[in-house]
Image (cartoon, rainbow, N blue to C red):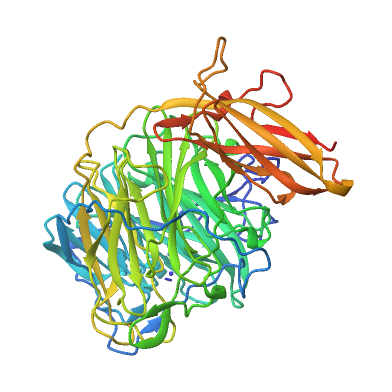
Amino acid sequence: MMRKTHTFLILLVLLALSLPATVSMAQDGAQSAGPNGQGPGTPVVTYATRSDISQPVRDFRPNPPNGNHEPIERPLRKLARGQGGQAGPIDVDSAVQTDVGSPAMPSLSTNWEGIGNRNGVLPPDTNGDVGPNHYVQTVNLSFQVWNKAGVSLYGPANTNTLWSNFGGPCQTTNDGDPVVLYDHLADRWMITQFALPNYPNGPFYQCIAVSQTPDPTGAYYRYEFLVSNNKMNDYPKFGVWPDGYYMTINQFNQGSGSWAGAGALAFERDKMLQGQAARMIYFDLYGVDPNLGGMLPSDLDGAAPPAGAPNPFIQLDDNAWGYPQDQLEIWNFHVDWTNTASSSFTKVNTLATAAFDSNMCAGSRNCIPQPGTAVKLDAIADRMMYRLQYRNFGTYEAMVANHTVDANGADRAGVRWYELRKSGANWSINQQGTYSPDSNNRWMASVAMDKTGNIGLGYSVSSGSVYPSIRYTGRLVTDALGQLPQGESTVIAGTGSQTHTASRWGDYSSLMVDPTDDCTFWYTTEYIQATGSAPWRTRIGSFKFANCGAPPPATTPMHVGDLDGARAWLSGNRAWTATVTVTVHEGQAPETGNPVLVQGATVTGTWSGGLSGTGTCTTGTGGTCSVTANNINKKKTSVTFTVNNVSKSNYSYVSTANHDPDGDSNGTSITVTRP
């Protein structure tokens, strides 16, 4: 965790709710005393409260760390969801990968020591990004710049060195929760942390510095934004998008620290790249849905998204938190800086996932074992792990994401990862899996995809016999879906354990892709070399798959070509059963002739009302497969089955082409009535 002043104008806007849930903004113009105290769901538009242009950072004398002392915990406030155990079902993970794989991952091309615990805090919140000529790393509470050969060019220095001579809390505090991103569309750097000058009371600020040139040791356009006077902007996570720098926060009420909902924000990137007066659009989502939290904005790599495309956000839901299923929510944040009345924050998809269990140690910090100590490490399984990477492949869009789960029902941490795709109007899950190939715990991961479609995954690993270490794995675009079969390699093996009783670890790590070749993965996170209270170190390593650079293999479109329902009474007529047969066809539009049937396609869907039964099947030679809901109470007169995804290697699911020739469904959902 960590903590900017100038006159400011606040433009009020009106929040409207609809189905799907939407937050929309009315005309600018009304003024307010500050971006807080509004009615439920009312967003605001404000200007930065302070801004300037700095001297070159290389000319600043680095602010030194505080004196030696027992490490101080930077508390991660817990989300409201899933605390103290869970009331709902504890699911058996249906997507666990049970072997490491035989091929060897590419060896590291760079591997050097990052910033250590110079500030005497934990956790480090390790984050970094790579540009054409530099690598920049941030931790709590420092940053450093290297060239890509690992030669240090500046630092380590306290992060608030960036705001030297700026004035206000961005200069006078150094509170952390840092993020650094390279904006490849503009060839610039963005570095940010929050400022909490009166913690645990407000006001609460976000400090953002955007480099004036491609040199991260040069001058910066610096901004202080007042996020709220009474809600803390915890756990800020950022993504680069053509029309803004997007941010998510978990909010907590001042003083008490009680849960205050999620926040979604966008910063006026075009103005900030020129050092001009810049605005912030802020949606306080507590009034929309108080259960939202742990969201991530998407962060762009490679080609720009389609013109005018909104920034997709992802929210994780466990059915044990009261949701009807394990799922991902997709929200779109659309910003129009010319006419903010047309801006919106809209829920557009709810995607059923393979079953997972996020209940790691009933929410206890003391969870991941280490050798030689009873102290365990924090799993943080209640939220998405940074970052949500987005790519535009032209014929489809893709996102990759991950979070920590209980892989075996006995508190063994594994990494659930996803590749989402959109080739029509809607996102779907193209593939997913849980990486937990042996008895070790793997968590605090970061996932990314190169320009060819290969996926890399970096993470922490620990157990009663393995010291906290850094490893990585991955998959080629041609590998079987749902698997990371390219072996497992080590960035650095730990040789000690962390004994601080706060048990803090993370709270995030960072896997980025080099913009120069759009192939090389750069990963950074923490490890322990010598046993002690909080002697964490960090490491920076890079690797590349040999096949990167070749175009991704062409995919064949497919869609649902028919849904048919059947029903029957069970013995005694006290319950009934519903069966739906799904037929899958090739193509991206309804057929005019004889359709080509698709064999070996996996259909995933959900029954209304959380009914028990099968929700997944694989098509046979006739292109069909069936799912069944059993023991339906006779009082329920009908049930509905909805197809959430259809997946097959080298095929892409085009949900907008779903249809039904006999008209008893819309091709995506079908209702079966009681006999």
Q: Between residues 627 and 255, which one lies in front from this camera angle? A: 627
Position in image of residue 93 (x %, y %): 53, 58
Q: What residue sits 62% from the left and 73% below the top?
A: 85
* Left or right of 650 in this view: 599: right
Q: Looking at the picture, does residue 422 appear above or below residue 252?
A: above
Q: In the orientation shown, which residue stands out farthest toward the top?
A: 593
Q: Looking at the picture, does residue 197 appear above or below residue 242?
A: below
Q: Can residue 346 be seen in this view?
A: no
Position in image of residue 266 (x %, y %): 48, 48
Q: Quadrant of residue 302?
A: top left
Q: In which quarter of the image is residue 495?
A: bottom left
Q: Where's the C terminus, which quadrant?
A: top right
Q: In the orientation shown, which residue stands out farthest toward the bottom?
A: 69
Q: What residue sits 78% from the left and 36% below the top?
A: 567
* Left or right of 550 in this view: 630: right
Q: What residue sits 70% from the left and 28% below the top?
A: 564
Q: Between residues 577 and 251, which one lies in front from this camera angle? A: 577
Position in image of residue 245 (x %, y %): 42, 48
